[in-house]
Image: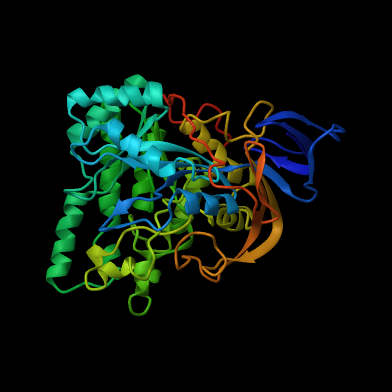
Amino acid sequence: MKTLIKNGRIVTAVDDYVADILIDGETISVIGKTLEMEADKVIDAKDRLVIPGGIDAHTHMDMPFGGTTSADDFKTGTLAAAHGGTTTIIDFAIQNKGQAIMEALDIWHEKAAGKTAIDYSFHMIVTDLPHERTKDLKRLIHDEGVTSFKLFMAYPGVLLVDDATIFRAMDFCGNEGGLVCMHAENGIVINEIVQRALAKGHTAPKYHALTRPTQAEAEGVNRAIALAEMANSPVYIVHLSCYDALKKVVEARDEGIPAFAETCPQYLFLDYSYYEKEGFEGAKYVMTPALREKWNQEKLWTGLRMNDLQVISTDHCPFCFKDQKELGKDDFSKIPNGGPGVETRMSLIYNGGVVPGRISVNRFVELTSTSPAKIFGLFPKKGTIAVGSDADIVIFNPNKKMTLSAKTHHMNVDYNCYEGMEVQGVTETVLSRGKVVIENEKYVGKAGDGKYIKRSRVSLKHSEPETAAAAR
């Protein structure tokens, strides 16, 4: 199958030009001016951006949590991702305490097999790592294409691991080409603050935020970076939410320490005031880390411009307001943590970043696709438009506007965090490895179009990805 994309403005992390693209099978075959070649399908991309498919490096599909399971499985979640212009997700397999790591991976392979609309890969959440189990990490890195591992400083008794376990994982990964991703919050102290709040009868959703101070995140980030430095290993901070935590990353990177971090749209566009909504409405925004005071947002945008934050992921972990969030009706600590976002990321970042001039269109592509591809071992197969790369391509209308709403989104959840927000920049057509899966905003693919992608080992010896285009 050959597909010809004509007249588009091709934008990558470093390029911006008008040309045609010939796709042969699953990969890009030719890029050139006014190509006159035979093709089975011709797509006119005049007045459109032609960009690499988005890579969401942080999603939680079909994830058990807090007595329930995230509302999107791999079928609904990846279909929603495709509608939003994302062509690859990296989800999290979870090792329960005492469980064999390979068994955990098998369970997540089973959850995803034959369901996905787009390509996918896995990180591994590690909760139990005695010395003898490090051989399983080696097998994942070298044989299974799982080259990143998430460890938690939060959720005592469930996911939290001690500093010795974190150091052990970092030391091993630093030598084997793996990367440790840290959920960095001081969960032990947070738990103490939560118990004090509940003892005072403070049960409303806003206390989720009020019991998780920014200092607890900053302390976790600082500790994660210190442990990584001792282990001579890179570290990646997930879902960084506030300036207190960002300062620790900036300081480390200025010292040349290979510290990397992502933020998420919710921390760029939502703030603490959402918890003050009437009744139980604030539960919709219970996620971890919590939403912060609004002034943090411009600090995060500065971090994105200056490459102290390299990636914008979603931490997509939706729970329906009815039946699921309501599990914490009388106790904020029982509200399932997480919110929906995999479908809205690309339009939100274009509208809030490129349209007002906070970031360039090249930086938009870098943050949403190229940088996660490089950091997580997918580049240049993914994350760019180049001859030989996978034809994961989004045809994006930079001028069209739409209103975000639960009535029109495709995520399997009964609310939208950005309900009623108008955004400029809309995904119209999406190709996943050369196959059109979204055409003129309509899904034309089928479950199972996506495939599991093994990722290559990580090589992040310095605080800059090899070919970063941004300006620090």
Residue 282, quarter of picture: bottom left
Using residue 156 as the reference point, say whether residue 257 is left or right of it: right
Identify the residue at image location x=43%, y=43%. Answer: 112
* Residue 87 point in image, percent of width and height: 57, 43
Residue 358 appears in view? no
Between 326 and 185, the one lying in front of the other is: 326
* Residue 114 point in image, percent of width and height: 49, 42
Using residue 203 as the reference point, say whether residue 146 is left or right of it: right
* Residue 45 point in image, percent of width and height: 77, 47
Identify the residue at image location x=27%, y=48%. Answer: 185
* Residue 342 point in image, percent of width and height: 49, 53
Q: What quarter of the picture does the N terminus occupy?
A: top right
Between 33 and 59, the one lying in front of the other is: 59
Residue 277 appears in view? yes
Between 22 and 242, the one lying in front of the other is: 22
Residue 361 in the image: above or below residue 171:
below
Residue 285, quarter of picture: bottom left
Using residue 55 as the reference point, say whether residue 50 is left or right of it: right
